[in-house]
Amino acid sequence: MEDRSRRRNVRDRRGGDLSHIQGGLGKATGEKIDVTCFDCGNPFEATNLGIATARLCFDCGTKREEQTALLERLAREKAEEQRYRELVRLANVPPRWRAVTFDTLDPNIQPVAQKVARAYAHGFSKESPSLVLYSPGNGTGKTTLGYCIVNLLLHELRVPVVARKARDVMLEIRNTFSDREQTEAAVLDKVSYVDLLFLDDVGVDPPSRWIHSTYWTLMDRRFDWELPVVITTNKPFEGRGEVLADRIGEGAASRLLGLCGGNVIDMSGEDLR
């Protein structure tokens, strides 16, 4: 008996809470009825749609929509900012190169290379070909131009990119042989599947079977997944002297050539350092 009385009191209180809609929970009639606004408490006229009858006046309904839109926009901006910070962490651009952009370059130095690299960056997609920045000597601006591409993709287009010295990648993989917390596969995964991989100074390591095998694995993965790579190197694809294949292996060089489709920028010139 006491339980029945308690349930009846609860129903009465619920009914009282919904009294702002006169007949609003009844059958929809399409007629105009007087309703008390949930937010401001002022009466307004609404169409009787049963449980779907409006519970907010026009002004309060508009405010609610604006507040909801604002909260959604702020949530999107926060999520985008968090994603951007993660992209910056992933890219791991060294301090020396963080402020390098196409706008900071001297337009009279390597103008053709600058034009090609700028067009490549602005038109980048995961389907873009790879790009090789080559010169037989040092100090011609290959690394600078590479980081111009990286920074534009990272900060303007918000593209996932990893920028590494090729030698550092090799050293990090070697360190896994004595590091139980990180594996060779984990290091390779970091650079194998990102939208763009920038490898600086490819071919500087003395050739070995292990170097050839590691470069093969990396280039083969990028090739299979059709993911572009931008590299700088002092070794040509062909010629009478030492070529890139001598340093990174025939298989890796072949995969790289297939990825770039002959998209090689020759930056031969004087040492600008």
Image (cartoon, helix red, strand yellow):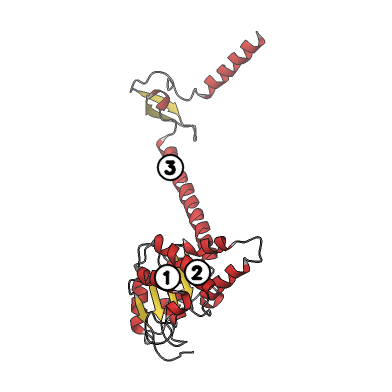
Which kind of residue does numbered mark 1 sit on? Answer: Gly
Q: Can you give x and y, in whole percent of width and height, for residue 33 in the image?
A: 38, 24
Circle 2 crowding by C-alpha within 10 Å: few under 14, some 14–19, many from 20 = some
Query: Residue placed at 38% from the left, 79% from the top?
Result: 237
Amino acid at circle 2: Ser
Q: Is residue 176 left or right of residue 120?
A: right
What residue is pinned by disc 2? 213
Identity, as a three-letter code, of the amino acid under mark 3 = Glu
- Tags 3 and 2 touching, CB below 8 Å: no
Question: In this orientation, which residue lies closer to the viewer: 146 or 58?
Answer: 146
Q: Which residue has dot 3 on it?
A: 65
Question: Mark 3, mark 1: which one is toward the viewer?
Answer: 1
Residue that numbered label 1 is attached to: 251
76 lies above or below 32? below
Quadrant housing residue 174? bottom right
Q: Please tell me which of labels 3 and 2 falls first in the chain.
A: 3
Q: Residue at x 50, y 62 (%)?
A: 87
Q: Residues within 10 Å of mark 1 (few under 14, many from 20)?
A: some
Q: Which residue is pictured at 40% across the width and 23% down the height? A: 50
Element carrying mark 1? helix
Q: Which element type, helix, strand or loop, lies under badge 2?
A: helix
